[in-house]
Image (cartoon, helix red, strand yellow):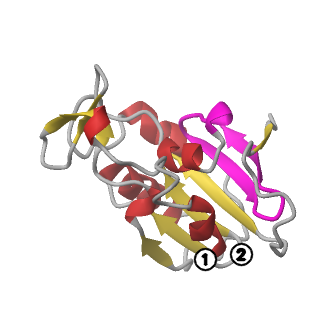
Amino acid sequence: MRTICRRANAKDGMKVKKKIAYLITHGERIPETANPGHTEEGLAQIRSLVLPADVSLIMAGTGQRFEDILKIISEKLKGVPVKYSPFCGGAESRGSNKTIILASGNVIPAESYVGLKAADIFDPWRLLEAVPDRTLFLAGGELLGALGFQSIKHKACLYGIDLAKRTAIILSKV
């Protein structure tokens, strides 16, 4: 299934040379816990994704769910260098009733959390433009949403992102 989404606020006319990025969102995770990892179902979801063969760099979030993804895909993408960034996703997670669970286990109201969607603070497109072509991001839905692709956000999904056109397509989905 290929779904195409164009970022609503894309800066049309901006000169960006042809560049592709890939992004994998985490699968089903252990609910209501600090720094959640994947459930067995979530691990199976990640294992079932079809990965691109031309990945030049892996950029992983710093939370356990991103470590889980890295462990699984490293078997298929041997030798690809890895870097870590909290911009791809951290140890915090969304709780119930509009809360955020911090890595420490403390629960705070969502309105007290400044995440990637605070566009006046963080431009996610600059992150994608700063890495090599065909970088694979292991990220959460927050980065995908900050890029403007909230409408096609799925768990355990591989996206192809065209930086010049600021579009995303689903390449592999459970």
Total marks placed: 2
Residue at horizontal 68 percent and vertical 49 percent from the top: 159
Is residue 8 visible to the viewer in this orientation of the structure? yes
Q: Is residue 148 magenta?
A: no
Residue at horizontal 61 percent and vertical 77 percent from the top: 130
Q: Position of residue 76 (x, y in %)?
A: 58, 63
The image quadrant that residue 79 belongs to is bottom right
Residue at horizontal 60 percent and vertical 64 percent from the top: 136
Quick one: label 2, few (<14), some, or many (20+) residues within 10 Å? some
Residue beneath disc 2: 133
Is residue 99 or residue 61 the one in the foreground? 99
- Work out which residue is located at the far front of the displayed protein and give it: 120
Is 117 placed above or below 135 here?
above
- Work out which residue is located at the far top of the displayed protein and give it: 97
| Residue 131 numbered tag | 1
Q: Position of residue 31 (x, y in %)?
A: 29, 29
Amino acid at pointer 2: Asp
| Residue 35 numbered tag | none
Q: Report the magenta residues as a range.
A: 150-174
Q: Position of residue 120 (x, y in %)?
A: 50, 56
Determine the secondary structure under disc 2. loop
Specify the quadrant that holds the C terminus. Answer: top right
Instruction: Say left or right for 27 vs 100.
Output: right
Q: Position of residue 80 (x, y in %)?
A: 56, 77
Q: Is residue 152 magenta?
A: yes
Q: CA distance from mark 2 to mark 1?
A: 7 Å
Quick one: label 1, few (<14), some, or many (20+) residues within 10 Å? some
Residue at horizontal 62 percent and vertical 50 percent from the top: 147
